[in-house]
Amino acid sequence: MNISISRSGNSFVATSVNIWLAIGDETGPFENSPLSGLHGIGLILARPADLVAALNDQVDGKSIRWRMNHPIDGLEASLTAKGPRKTKELARHHVREAWEYFRDCGIKGQYQLDAVPPDFVLANLLGTFRWLAAHPNILSLGIHGSGTEILVDFWKGSDPMAAIGALYGRTLALVSPFLGASPQIRILPGRRSEEINAAAIRRAGQIVAPPRLGTSRQTTSNTGGNRTLLDAMENEFWQTLSAMGDQWHIPSHSLARKSAFAGYMDRAEFATALYKEDKIAANLIRTEERTLNNLADLACSLMAASCDSNARDLRIIFPDPIGPNVRFFSASEVLL
Amino acid sequence: MSRWAFSLQMDAGLSLLAGHLVKIILRTDGPRLYLNVGEAGESNSCEGNVFSAILQAVGAHAFSAAGKGCTITSVPAPWSVWIKPTSMPTPQDLLGAELALELWLLPSEDINDLDGARKSLEARRSSLNEDTREALAYWLLGSTHPLGGRPDLKNGWRADTQEVLVIRSTDWARRRRPPEPLLAAAQILLEELTQLRKVATTITSYDKLIDSLEVIIDPLPDAFRQAIWWEAGYQLAARGLHQEANIATQHYRNACDRLKARLPGLIDGGIPGFGVSVGQRAYYSGEFGIALSAYQKEWVSGSKQHRSRLKRLIANVFSDLGALAAARRLAEGALAEQEISGDPETYKTIGRCGEIALRSGNIDEAADLYQRSQEAQRQLLGAQEVEGRTTVYRGHVALLAGNLDEAADRYAEAHGADALKDSRLNAYALMGEAALALHRRDTAAATACLDRLEGTDELSINGDALPRAVVILSAIALGVAPREKGLAAITALIDDNYMAETLALLPLVYRHVGMANKELNRIAETLQQWEKALLAVPELVGERVDDDPTPKVLLTAIAEVKRRGNWQALAPLRARIFPTNLISTAKPIA
């Protein structure tokens, strides 16, 4: 499988602003109790121009942009066969669908990351994993743990949205001192929905708009979950930095803090805010949000595949480190 | 136990962020250090980590270091993910660093830089063994921290060094014979210094002591040399051997310079007693500003070892500067402390109180104090060992009180006492006798004093201009010496910084004020510097007393003398300036 990397040409070139874009996704059944299985968040972090360039990278003759807006190559027929419930999956690169496919097809065994397996879908999945793991300008970061481990330090007030926010905040705080002078981190966490009768919603006395017919879930923009996630994320970000005592300056004014670190869950709001700071970033979010979300899914899946391989009949054996810009923490490593 | 800061580099290990290392500074408490005597180590190779090398070097000289209570601050969670565990300092590192501070191999700060300490010590690794030996030698003599390892040393060693090096005991005797080479040599040093206080030493005595110690321990540590030459400078000055004291003090300063070059921790804190040495030499040269500055540095350096002595020494300067109230307060404070501690120099402080009383015009009090001082000397040294100096002062008191026969007896007694121990002429007794001749208008006696003075080798009375001037001017006042000799004496007095004394004597050689303009200007110039020197140490001077004959008062008098064109304005002061008042108060010759 051939991979070609497109260069932005300006990585780490000194500019007046030092914007970093993060796109995140989570893994694990955060709403289920008791918490079982792997929980965590994964994200990609890069400078906007590098992300734009990355979308033009070629893997086996197909651009990343194309790949992120289609199912994993070879999976389309399988998804089509599953009928309308998988229609949405035909327009995105969702690694979970590949795992379903492997299970359904009885594809088992162990494969090295650099293997070229006979199964076309698996070969393409490994190819995109390799592309991300080897990317010189995109950081793949995350925190993972069992539900119990996550519960120890990240489960803020029994609200899964707050836990997810805290995981994002901790991850980005840990890398922020290395991002050069006065970095401005802007994050788009993965959009979610939640059960309208979730305990956290009930406790908050939230008035939730009725869900669509046939489902008990509602998007978190309507449940108040977004605000909870963002608040928890920002709190955790600054709290993690302040754990270092007086080593780093923590701005006392909220505007200054917002300038250094801000999260958005609404594309339009995010793009508008970015427009004043970095037009490339604003345009990227406005036009490629879905592509970027699928890249975050890829990063999160890379974390799950590398950290939770025992959970499946098909195992991918990753090198250590997985890649030069990949770091997935276990929750116990990064407890406050 | 000291506070330490050390830096660590966080490294994300992500290639995109390569080169973006983040430095963090952590602070931690070092261990509480104990230095003990121990078995001599076999190796002095100073290998491995430089902090371990110091611990090895200490071991090579039969000492050991132990520490308690060291807590190394860890990198706060979750940031330790970016730190390599091997980059953290170990308790052993901090023990070595703490030892380096204790031994002055590093300067001490409120918070000490562990990385800087490592680099600094690494840069001198080749001399670390020798530097550590020197530091241990100095530590044995100059530290106040206890020496552990044996019950007899725990308190005993510091009590010994205090008694010999600070209190300057004359009857200390060693109680143990340690096998450790440095400790054994230090103990012999203490014993020899004590012995030398019992005899009339010259600079050769101390040269011989160094020769004998070099046989025992080679090379002789500079720490030992500085202790020897400090003592020599002090003792020789006390004997009036100022030229030899100057040489000894130069040796002392050279040894201190070498010590400071090896032990940078001594540079800021200073070597206890250094200010005493510098101040004393300046005092005897009439450089009162330098003397006060040196004493003040010693005062504030934090070492209380020399405080009582320092009070007396500052009182000496103050009394010569006419700041009598301040001098009295300090001298009486020193006396109270020394009487409690049984200080062997108590008699000197009583004598200083006597001189302050004398300068203040309290003749009866002065007589009483000098008598007490002499009695204290007799008890301390034995009647045969008492020098004639205090007897001379008692003669001056008698003279000023008008008891001329008693004064004559005292001066004769002083000559007799000194003749037993020292062949040199007691110039101050001769000075008293000349003044006595003036009071008695005894021209023959005045001539005899002048002849004796002029027949004496100048070096044997240290070329001291003051007694020489008093003898000459007494003879001039009685008309048995030419005025030219008086002019030369006045010039010598000014050259030796006897400004107040010269001022008091000027009317004896210059009938008209205008003739003395050059001298008056030079005196005024120096007095202005001395006034500034007093103003620079307000915490020592305390409240100024207007009545004291300070430089400021003398300057006012000079201005008045110049304004009036006669010496009348000096009249009230001439009686208060000692010892020239011995002759300036004599009735004018008709």
Image (tube, coloured by chain):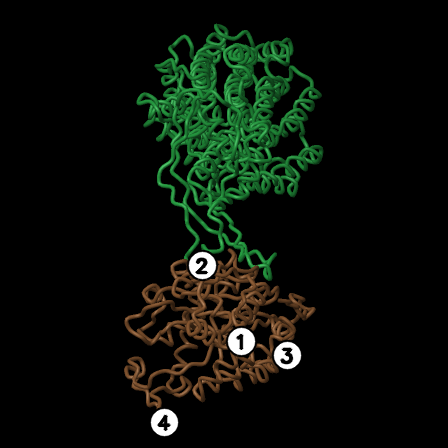
Chain colours: A brown, B green
CA distance for labels 4 and 3: 39 Å
Q: Which residue is mark 3?
A: A280
Quarter placement of the N terminus of chain B: top left
**Along the polypeptide, which appears first: circle 2 or circle 3?**
2
CA distance for labels 2 and 3: 34 Å
Report the mark closest to the observer, 3 or 1: 1
Question: Label 3 amino acid?
Answer: Ile
**Along the polypeptide, which appears first: circle 4 or circle 2?**
4
Q: Which mark is residue B406?
A: none
Residue A92 falls left or right of residue A55: left
Tell me the subunit letter for badge 1. A
Q: Position of residue A77 (x, y in %)?
A: 51, 82
Q: Which residue is mark 1?
A: A72
Residue B45 falls left or right of residue A36: right
- Residue B590 appears in view: no
- Which one is nearer the viewer's eye here, B422 or B127? B127
CA distance for labels 1 and 4: 30 Å
**Along the polypeptide, which appears first: circle 2 or circle 1?**
1
- Residue B350 appears in view: yes
